[in-house]
Image (tube, rainbow, N blue to C red):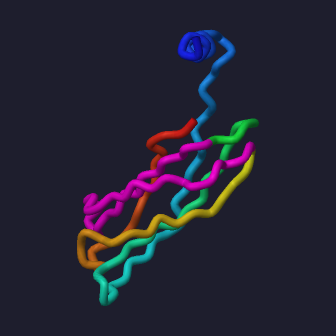
Amino acid sequence: MIAYAVYAILTTDRYVKPDPPILSASGMHSIETMGGPYVTCFGNIRNPNNRQLKNIVLQAHFFNSSGEQIDSILHELKIPLRAEDELKFRIREGASNVASDYESCSIEVVEYW
């Protein structure tokens, strides 16, 4: 019965997938530590919808000075993004290459609802 109700909601005109969040990468930082290299991508995310978004999964792509992608990191936002709200975020993780190889980053939305 529940499965039918969900199917009915998703197949009617009443359900419209919200617009994706709007992202902008504002910078990156890489550092060598005693535990190994770390890389961080900073950015802003804005919800253009009049309802909150949840389960937002972002992917940060990291590039070297030649513009070649050398690393990527998946990151799930732990909190919902309220309607028409904007947040600053950072994605930080151990790097796959030496810190000096990282030149820039970009961000994309992989999943949301």
- Percent x, y of residue 66: 26, 65
Q: Is residue 111 above or below residue 75?
A: above
Using the image as rendered, state which of residue 56 and residue 31 is in the foreground. Answer: 56
38 sits left or right of 108 in the view: left
Picture layout, residue 56 above or below residue 6: below
Q: Quadrant of residue 105?
A: bottom left
Which residues are the magenta region? Answer: 54-83
Residue 62 x, y percent position in the rendering: 35, 62
Residue 55 falls in image quadrant: top right
Q: Residue at 57% x, 35% y: name it.
A: 113
Compared to residue 85, the image places residue 51 above or below, namely above
x, y percent for residue 112: 54, 39
Task: Kindly identify the residue that appears in the image at 24 percent across and 72 percent down.
Answer: 97
Residue ranking furthest to the bottom: 34
**Looking at the image, which residue sits at the far front?**
1
Residue at 37% x, 58% y is 73
Residue 59 sits inside the magenta stretch? yes
Of the pair 75 and 104, the residue shown nearer to us: 75
Q: From the viewer's perspective, is 51 left or right of 89?
A: right
Answer whether residue 38 is magenta in the image: no
Q: Is residue 5 above or below residue 25?
A: above
In the rendered image, residue 95, in percent from the top left (x then y), is placed at 30, 71
Q: Which quarter of the rendering shows the N terminus? A: top right
Query: Nearest the camera: 87 or 10?
Result: 10
Q: For this rendering, which residue is in front, 93 or 103? A: 93
Tally the marks: 0
